[in-house]
Image: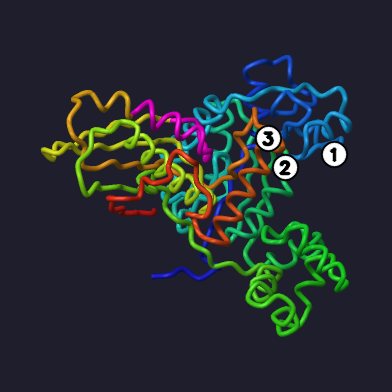
Amino acid sequence: MQLSPQNRSIAHLDLDAFFASVECLKDSRLQGRPLVIGGQGDRSVVASCSYEARHFGVRSAMPMKLALQLCPDATVISGDMESYSQYSHTVTEIIREEAPLFEKASIDEFYLDVSGMDRFFSTTQWSTELRHRIMQETGLPISMGLSSNKLVSKVATGEAKPNGQQYVPFGSERAFLAPLPVTKIPMVGPKTSRFLAEMGIRTVQTLSEMPLEMLRSAFGKQGVALWKRAQGIDDTPVVAYSERKSISTETTFDQDTIDIRKLKAVLTGMVEKVGFRLRKHQKLTACITVKLRYSNFDTVTRQVRLPYTASDHLLMQSAHELFDKLYQRRMLVRLVGVRLSHLVHGSHQIHLFEDTQEDVRLYQAIDFLKHKYGPHTLTRAVTMGTKVGTREQHHTL
């Protein structure tokens, strides 16, 4: 039975300045200082930054050179995705122990459906105690919003930051959102906000008072979604988190082969495909598995845990290392497979601590062309010609 909005209780938890907070735990001397996480070169990009750095206008994905112009005294740290992944896993396990239903929306963000718990315990008190447990056991600051839906809870979390919490009672969602700028609505990016500003719409209240048909005419289906969000309406369910979700592909050869160069070229092409699909779904992976099936149908697999990533070059490195460990029998190979699992929602850029602006733009350009013209539009030269005599199977999520 679907609960009415009045009976729903959705908590949103978001670790504050996550990467910077982890660095402060590792080195207490960094507390209170402006920190910028990213590559050390001028052409690198900012992966994350502390609130002290944000005070100077530093933002994620900003060129490092510009960040240091805005905040010359900032401490630049290359970043340690392995540590960030481990802390994320720790927080996930705490929530898993306590919450009846939760969704891991990204490496540092969670939704919890605690509907019905108020029959036994105040949902506000329960959520508060969970937040305090996370802070006590990890040392990380975390903010929380609690309301009848995911949208309002997420906005409430943003308003409570840093290291705070806010409860929005049922019936007050629209009043809570009304005075906020439209940019506080999650789906409103720079382009949409500029368009709305040209229409004279700068606050959520003004947006909520606009005729629905006018917004539909201006934005299509997105206009309807904008109007609903401005009213504080969101019936999106919390999707149970499961690390079993995966993206995978397999290639079966028409003729079994022992050609190592061909096998590795096919493997490279397969990683390119699953990496692109990973970024297309805006996911990060923490585990890669390589599978081999020999001509006698013996099948072997090997996997390795990774810091969260969506970068082809990091995935390829791990895939080739796994292949070298697997392929020990020097027998003809019938099938090669790659699977990415332990997926969370997240930006492909957050871990590119050593990549330059050019590297990031290259990934963006390649993915744009693949989105527009198809996934086979661009590929590494080593994979060319590997399609002959093969059959592929794809499995996504």
Q: Residue at label 2?
A: 161
Q: Residue at label 1?
A: 57
- Would you call the spot at circle 3 few (<14 residues within 10 Å), some (14-19), or many (20 or more)? many
Disc 3 versus disc 1: nearer the observer: 3
The quadrant of the image that shows the N terminus is bottom left
- The kind of secondary structure the magenta stretch mainly shows is helix
Q: Residue at x 54, y 50 (%)?
A: 282
Residue type at the position of mark 2: Lys
- In the rendered structure, which disc, 3 or 1, sits on the residue that comes first in sequence? 3
Residue 318 in magenta stretch: yes
Q: Residue at label 3?
A: 47
- Would you call the spot at circle 1 few (<14 residues within 10 Å), some (14-19), or many (20 or more)? few
The image quarter containing residue 170 is bottom right
- On the image, the x and y values in percent for residue 296 come to 11, 38
The alpha-carbon separation of the residues under discs 1 and 2 comes to: 17 Å
Give the total of numbered labels: 3
Q: Is residue 201 left or right of residue 315?
A: right
- On the image, the x and y values in percent for residue 292 come to 24, 37
What is the secondary structure assignment of the residue under circle 3?
strand
Q: Is residue 70 left or right of residue 225?
A: right
- On the image, the x and y values in percent for residue 88 come to 52, 34
The image quarter containing residue 349 is top right
Residue at the extreme bottom: 213
Q: Is residue 152 left or right of residue 339?
A: right
- Would you call the spot at circle 2 few (<14 residues within 10 Å), some (14-19), or many (20 or more)? many
Residue 74 visible to the viewer: yes
Extent of the magenta region: 306-322
- In the rendered structure, which disc, 3 or 2, sits on the residue that comes first in sequence? 3
Disc 1 versus disc 2: nearer the observer: 1
What is the secondary structure assignment of the residue under circle 2?
loop
